[in-house]
Amino acid sequence: MKSKSSSKKATRTPVASRIEVRCSGIHGKGVYATARIRKGARIIEYTGRRLPWKKAMDLAPHHPDDPHHTLLFSLDNGDVIDASAGGNDSRWINHSCNPNCETMEEDGRIFVYALRGLRPDEELFYDYKLVPAERRTKKTEKKFTCLCRTTKCRGTMLEPKKRRTSRRKKAVPARRNRAAR
Ligand SMILES: C[S@@+](CC[C@H](N)C(=O)[O-])C[C@H]1O[C@@H](n2cnc3c(N)ncnc32)[C@H](O)[C@@H]1O
Ligand SMILES: [Zn+2]
């Protein structure tokens, strides 16, 4: 994903101390706010070991019972961050199709920002916009079924399908997060 605005690059103290990992109502563990977090706050960095996408695809699934469970996050240079090694609490943030957080790549690092003000006890979510390693089909979408239960749910954690643009309209390249697998 591309950095969006230079204003967000300003050095701010991460508010990682205002979050904690708890059981999620959506899936497994999740990350919750323990105090108010203001809109635009940089919450936490998505950390882990870095490796080329191809190497990451050769890794054995870390959850053999759930082979589509992913801890990978793609970078613009083609590498991925694998949070199964060196990952912090950010690796437990779940996906929502109507998220309250977003991720930004800045100088090859991924940060999670609050899209709006967050209240204590709210679960944090960002839109994974997953890019599958295989061709996108209904079957692939189903492998990555979303359980976010929001009115905007796409039914899948895969990235939204690209809309066809009218021939006369100039196509603008989209910015997007890329998570892998
Ligand atoms: C980075 S982990 C997030 C933490 C996860 N809840 C756990 O306990 O391992 C990502 C995985 O969580 C699951 N997940 C996250 N958000 C989900 C959602 N909205 N619907 C279904 N599964 C979800 C998927 O298996 C996904 O591959
Ligand atoms: Zn959803």
Image (cartoon, rainbow, N blue to C red):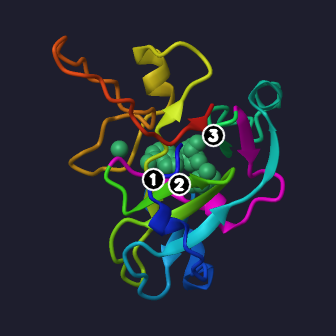
Magenta highlight range: 78-97
Quarter of the image for residue 10 reads bottom right
Going by the numbered disc 1, the residue's amino acid type is Lys
The residue at the far bottom in this view is 35
Going by the numbered disc 3, the residue's amino acid type is His
User: As drawn, is 116 to the left or to the right of 91?
Assistant: left
Q: Secondary structure at mark 2?
A: strand
Q: Secondary structure at mark 3?
A: loop
Q: Is residue 66 above or below residue 132?
A: below
- Please give the residue where the numbered disc 3 appears in the rendered image: 69
- Please give the residue where the numbered disc 2 appears in the rendered image: 104
Label 3 residue near ligand 1, CB within 8 Å: yes
Ligand 2 located in image quadrant: top left
The CA distance from mark 2 to mark 3 is: 22 Å
Going by the numbered disc 2, the residue's amino acid type is Met
From the image, state whether disc 1 or disc 2 is nearer to you: 1
Rendered image: mark on residue 4 = 1
The first of marks 1 and 2 along the sequence is 1
The CA distance from mark 1 to mark 2 is: 7 Å
Rendered image: mark on residue 156 = none
Label 2 near label 1: C-beta < 8 Å? Answer: yes
The residue positioned 51% from the left and 55% from the top of the image is: 103
User: As drawn, is 44 to the left or to the right of 97?
Assistant: right
User: Percent from the top left, x then y, of residue 22?
Assistant: 57, 72
The first of marks 3 and 1 along the sequence is 1
The residue positioned 25% from the left and 22% from the top of the image is: 170
User: Percent from the top left, x then y, of residue 141?
Assistant: 44, 24
Q: Nearer the viewer, residue 94 or 74?
A: 74
